[in-house]
Structure formats: C-alpha cells, structure tokens
Image (tube, coloured by chain):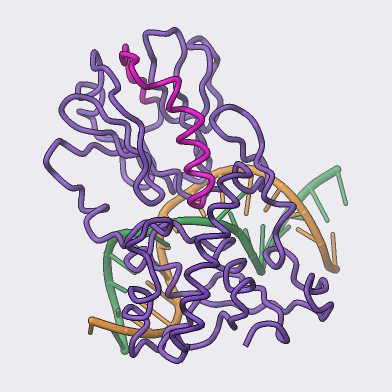
Chain colours: A purple, B orange, C green
Amino acid sequence: MPELPEVETSRAGIAPHLEGRIVTRLVVRQPRLRWSVPEQLAACLEGKTIRAVTRRGKYILISVDGGAALLHLGMSGSVRILPADTPAGKHDHVDLLLDSGSMLRLTDPRRFGALLWQPDNELHSLLASLGPEPLSDEFDAGYLQACCQGRKTAIKTLIMNSQVVVGVGNIYANEALFQAGIDPRRAAGRISAARLETLVACIKQVLARAIEQGGTTLRDFVGGDGKPGYFKQELHVYGRAGESCTACGNILKEVRLGQRSTVYCPSCQR
DNA sequence: CTAAGGACCTGTCGGC
DNA sequence: TGCCGACAGGTCCTTA
C-alpha cells in the first residue's frame, strides 16, 4: 500500500489523535513483523506523553521522552484510529492505547512492516544510510547527477533506491519517468544533466500532488482519518499496460526491472 | 564498490 | 465451484 504520499497521509491522519496524549498501554498481539516487535517497547512507551509524530522516508516516528517508536508499513500495513474496545481481526498486530479512550491500531497482513525502538541520541541502523527527502532542497539536479555518475543501473531502479532518495516507490517512479519523458530502462549514467533536472522536478511534482490528493487508493488503502486517496485518477502509466498513452495515444508497454512491473510509453519516453 | 536475484508473507485475481 | 500460479504498494541480505 504505502509509498511516501500514503505514509505522509497516514502520518497526518493519526498525528492529531496522538500528539499530547499519554500512552496508557501497548498491546502486542502478534509481534511477528519483518522484525519482531521488541519486548521492551511497551516499557519504553507506557506512561509517556507523545511529543511528536513525524516522518523520515517511509518511516513514521512516534516520539516520546527517551526515544521514538519507528513504524514502517511495508507493502500491506495500515494504521487506524479506533475506539479502544474495538475487537481485533486476524492481521491486527499492535494496539497503542491512549488516555483519550482511542487507540492506534496497526494492521499488516503480509507482515513486511516493522515496529521498532530508537533511543534518543541514537540513529537506528535502518535510518542511517537513507538518502535525502525528495521534497527537500537537498534533493536537486546536481545531487542526482552525482548519484548517476558512472552508474549502469536502470534509472528507475536508481530512483527507487532509498540510499539515493527516499520515498520513491514503484507507482511514483513509473509516473515521474513518464512525466519526464525518460525511458525507465535507460542507464542512469547516460542521461544528460538537463534531463536529470527535469526528472528531479517531476519526482517532486508527482509526490507533492499525490500528497495533496491524499495518496493513491489501491485496494483498501485509507489514511488515518479513514478517507480514501484520490491520486489514482491521475495515474498515467502505473497499472495501465496495454492501454493507450494519455499524451500520444500509442499503446503503453510493460517490462520488468528489478522484478518490479514497469510501464512506459515507447514513443514519449526515450 | 556495483548489480542482480532471492527472501520474507498473505491475499486476490485470472485461467483452466 | 475449485485449484494453481502469478502478482501486489518494500527493502534487506546474499551472491557474483
């Protein structure tokens, strides 16, 4: 479900319900996620006031005095704010109960998500080698050009690499490359500076627009406030293989890059 | 160092 | 209707 816009939508949806609240209890009913939920997490959170709910890449950080809970939604994770007495379903892993009488419930059928602990003054190893935020000034044409220098990797694979830039997943990589008119298979090191500058602008624009729209609704994605995302209506290539290009009318082609479905227009993207 | 592939999971969908 | 394989928003880890 989540790429950066979906994570940001989730973060924004849950933050008002969490910030300033006290964690009364952490119920871990199914600790097995990508990594097991640490046993000491409850002790780290219970009785603490939630100071902030922020985001780094696709991680949501729930900060309290002493550290932060790191939440990653993986492929199929989602969070909802519910009354504390809502019965749990099969894939409901963790409930974070609050003094408001509500709770934050983490659901993740495929279990690729994670819930970990990062003490103050320690950068968790998962966050240590992340590239810049795509919407920050640090992510600019010069930076991307330096990353592409001498690289033979397909440009799509490169922009999906979180060490290069965080938050660009399969949907928005496809969309940004379409907007930029670049063939996703093209070797990163063989793209002109001018075209990389366009690509940076397109990545920012696509992500910003998707956040505005509340993310892309795929299957059952809903933000923390329960409202669906509306970006799906604006997808030009993702999920449209075999259909006609919205710009030129030619048939969109599909290939696999790094085992990920890649859709592009053979005439608009070179 | 780079690049490519496997691995981790469950649910859903299309084809037979 | 039922079974089986392919595929799905991510990303770490191993291998070459």
Q: Residue at x 42, y 84 (%)?
A: A153
- Seen in the picture, residue A6 relative to A172 is either above or below; the reply is above
Residue C1 image point, x, y percent: 85, 43
Looking at the image, residue A269 sits to the left or right of residue A136; the answer is: right
Q: Residue at x 51, y 67 (%)?
A: A201
Tally of numbered discs: 0
Location of residue A47 (image quadrant): top left
Residue A112 falls within the magenta-colored stretch: no
Residue A246 image point, x, y percent: 79, 70
> What are the residue bounds of the magenta stretch?
A3-28
Residue A7 falls within the magenta-colored stretch: yes
Quadrant containing the C terminus of chain A is bottom right
Residue A8 image point, x, y percent: 48, 42
Location of residue A207 (image quadrant): bottom right
Looking at the image, residue B7 sits to the left or right of residue A52; the answer is: right
Residue A4 image point, x, y percent: 48, 51
Looking at the image, residue A241 sits to the left or right of residue A204; the answer is: right
State the residue in front, A36 or A73. A73
Location of residue A138 (image quadrant): bottom left
